[in-house]
Amino acid sequence: MATLTESTTASPGGRNGAGVTVRVLLFGHYRDAVEAAGGDASGALQLELPPGATVRDVADALTAREPRLGDLLARTRVAVRAEFADPETPLEEGDEVAFLPPMSGG
Amino acid sequence: MILLTQEPLNPDDAVRHVMTRADGACVQFVGVVRDHSRGRAVTGLEYQVYLPMAEAQMRRIVDEVRNRWGLACAILHRYGPIPVGEAAVVVCVAGAHRGEAFDACRWAIDTLKAEVPIWKKEFAADGTYWIEGDESLPATTTNDPAP
C-alpha cells in the first residue's frame, strides 16, 4: 500500500544536496485524513522534495496521495519552523512544515 | 507567565503571578468546558496543540500586553481531554486601574483564539467533531474523552 512517507522524486535529497527532506505536521480533521491514509498517529510525516521546493509543493505532494487534503492551502495558514510562513516560502533540509486549520483554542 | 499543561488549571496561580502592590485591578478570564455547543449536547472536549508554536505565540501575547498597556499578563492553557465544568484557559491581567486591565484581558483572549495553534475536538451526543474556526467537521478518530 502506498504511504505518505514515500519519496516524491526520483532523486530525493540527502547528503548529496539534491533535494530536501522535511517533516510535515497536520492538525484537526486533516490529521485524521492522514492517519486513515497510512500516516502515523502523531500527525507527522517525512517528505522528500526536489531542490527549491516550497510549502506549496508540500501541499501538492500531499494532495496527490490523499484527495481529502486538496483544500489544505485554501483552509489553512502555514508555518515553517514554528513561525507563520506562506505558500511560496522555500524549504531547507530538516524544516518542519505545519498546516494550521482555523484555530479553536480558548 | 505562560503555561501549557495537561493537568487541571489553577486560576489562582495566574493571579499570584501578575499581582503587585502597585495594582488596584485584576481581570481574569476563565474559559470552561460547557455541556452544549451549536445545539448539540457535549460530554467533553479534547484539545490538540502544536506545542512549540503555541508557546511562542502565547509568549508574544504576554509581551504585547506589556508593550501596549504596560501590564503583566499570565496565560494558562490546558490540552488533552478536559471534562465538562473544568477550565481550558485562564487569562489574567493586573494593572493600577480596571479600564486598561479589562481592555488588555479582552484583547489577549481574542488574540489567543485567533493566533495560538490549538484545536478542540468535541465529543457530542451525536458524534465527534473537530472545531476549526466557525466550522465543525466530523472526526474519524473516536477516542472517548477521559472521565
Image (cartoon, grey):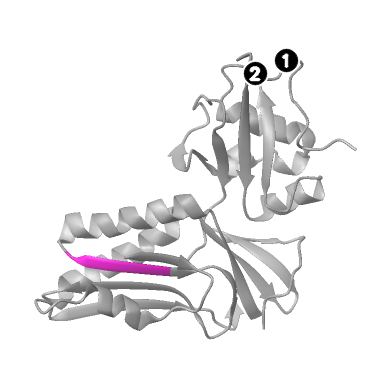
Q: Main secondary structure of the magenta part?
A: strand
Disc 2 residue type?
Pro
> Numbered disc 1: what chain?
A
Q: Residues within 10 Å of mark 1 (few under 14, many from 20)?
A: some
Residue B63 on the magenta segment: no
> Numbered disc 2: what chain?
A
Residue B29 placement (x, y as % from top left): 35, 76
The segment highlighted magenta reads: B71-76
Report if the CB atoms under discs 1 and 2 are less than 8 Å apart.
yes
User: Is residue B105 visible to us here?
Assistant: yes
* Circle 1 residue: A11
On the rendered image, what quadrant is the N terminus of chain A found in?
top right
Residue shown at the point (74%, 69%) measured from the top left:
B143
Q: Nearer the viewer, residue B42 or B17?
A: B17
Q: Nearer the viewer, residue A18 or A32?
A: A18
Residue B2 figure quarter: bottom left
Residue at the extreme right: A1
Residue at the extreme front: A15
Q: In front: mark 1 or mark 2?
A: 1
Residue B40 placement (x, y as % from top left): 66, 78
Label 1 – label 2 distance at C-alpha: 7 Å
Residue B66 placement (x, y as % from top left): 20, 59
Q: Is residue B95 shown left or right of residue A93? A: left
Residue B135 placement (x, y as % from top left): 60, 59
Indicate which disc residue A50 carries.
Answer: 2
Residue B73 on the magenta segment: yes
Indicate which disc residue A56 carries.
Answer: none
Above or below residue B22? Residue A54 is: above
Label 2's element? loop
Residue A9 figure quarter: top right
Residue shown at the point (34%, 56%) measured from the top left:
B59
Disc 1 residue type?
Ser
